[in-house]
Image: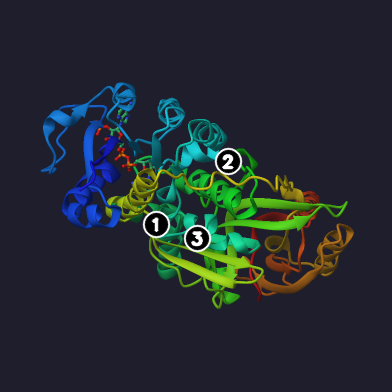
Amino acid sequence: MTSPVRLALLGCGTVGSEVVRLLHEQSTDLAARIGAPLEIVGIAVRRLGRDRGALPVDEALFTTDALGLIKRDDVDVVIEVVGGIEPARGWLVEALRAGKSVVTANKALLAEDGAALHDAATEGRADLYYEASVAGAIPLLRPLRDSLHGDRVNRVTGIVNGTTNFILSAMDATGAGFAEALEEATELGYAEADPTADVEGFDAAAKAAILASLAFHTRITAADVHREGITEVTAADVASAKAMGCTIKLLCIAARGRDAAGSETVSVRVHPAMIPLTHPLASVGDAFNAVFVEAEAAGQLMFYGRGAGGAPTASAVLGDVVAVARNRLAGVRAASESAYADLAVRPMGEALTRYHVSLDVADRPGVLASVAGVFARHDVSIATVRQGSAGGGRPGSGDDAELVIVTHVAPDAALAATVGELHGLDIVRSVTSVLRVEGEA
Ligand SMILES: NC(=O)c1ccc[n+]([C@@H]2O[C@H](COP(=O)([O-])OP(=O)(O)OC[C@H]3O[C@@H](n4cnc5c(N)ncnc54)[C@H](OP(=O)(O)O)[C@@H]3O)[C@@H](O)[C@H]2O)c1
């Protein structure tokens, strides 16, 4: 058989240790599929003495010198499952420039500075694969990067963070508040000790940037993504969504649009939103991920599965390793980044969506007309109004009342101006929540 394709593994934690296990368990099949065996020649970690269980690998392969490992002449492919911006960026740029193929799961780095990696890959004529960086085991990037290259993607809507989907699903199922659902997620191992990256939407925003870059052939970074997390979502919001036949999900939405001059643009945003129970993403529960792609000729496509976890993520890593190993043996390289469209990123203020606004108002005659007047002044058309008694008193009794207003589609800036003016009205005690509503009602 042909001489082995030699791998340097950077990181041997949750994902890395599963990569080692799968490489060992499936070595015969992988060799047959590639046409050459795969061989790990070194594993870089931070702590040499760490207990990693019974990994099927020689202890002598471990090193703390990642850069030294990458530079070795006997390394063909570098697998990076460490994470973070530095030193990972320096390592991968070094490897790619030296013509070594890279497989990485590092969404943070790709979203922050994917350009540095793509440029280095072009310079070194090396492959850069990163299927595991978005939605774990779900084959999603290669369908966008390859299978849909003959089509025109118009919109990508996804649930790409398992932790927040678990929390919102638990709130929906039990009526629990955010803090209680987060506690349950932490106990069950779905949320990290510091859940900020997940609950504040940073993780989803990084994935949104990667998806949008591939879908729209434009370099999008995490800084281009409008981001809101789920910490403000209340049990009352979830109940209100239910009353409307909706559920609340943290969505990543990347869509084509046009600016005032008619030029094509792209908008990329991550925020909680109500979606109708009939929407394909509404039934994605627990910590699952799903991405809904709308393309011109293909129509609607749905990708669903486990978006995280050691083994599912390692599955995506190994798929990429097989692809780059085959390319090396064939002496070819995959098509590089396609950013030719270079679309302008539309500001969030111009994003069009519907809104669900809850207000605590004085229960007096004329209040509804005053509130409706504010919406009209900002050209935000009201679709439905529901009125209840906030304090449990009789409507018209002078107690506070609750107004729930759902609008037709309006620009985000117009809604923000509406809410700003509502805050200033003396009849409005508080604007208790503002949520976007996505999908057809
Ligand atoms: N976990 C998931 O479900 C998942 C899903 C999709 C993508 N990802 C991505 O996969 C990557 C790895 O995630 P993970 O969950 O496997 O992380 P992890 O469990 O924290 O493992 C990180 C590994 O990197 C090593 N490391 C850290 N700093 C290092 C340094 N300076 N030099 C050499 N090695 C270093 C650590 O060494 P020690 O073992 O010695 O500490 C550890 O082995 C991240 O980019 C993450 O975003 C993870």
Q: What residue is drawn where x is 71% and y is 49%?
A: 348
Residue 228, percent from left and from top = 58, 48
Type of residue at label 1? Gly
Type of residue at label 2? Ala
The disc, 2 or 3, on the residue closer to the chain's N-terminal end is: 3
Which label lies toward us, 2 or 3?
A: 3
Type of residue at label 3? Pro
| Front-most of residues 427 and 52 | 52
Above or below 205: residue 90: above
Q: Is 236 displayed left or right of 172 in the figure?
A: right
Residue 8, percent from left and from top = 28, 34
The residue tagged 3 is 143
- Separation of marks 1 and 2 at Cα, in angstroms: 19 Å
The disc, 1 or 3, on the residue closer to the chain's N-terminal end is: 3
The residue tagged 1 is 307
The residue tagged 2 is 222
Q: Quadrant of ligand 1?
A: top left
Q: Secondary structure at mark 1?
A: loop
Residue 262, percent from left and from top = 85, 55
- Separation of marks 1 and 3 at Cα, in angstroms: 16 Å
Q: What residue is drawn where x is 27% and y is 54%?
A: 311
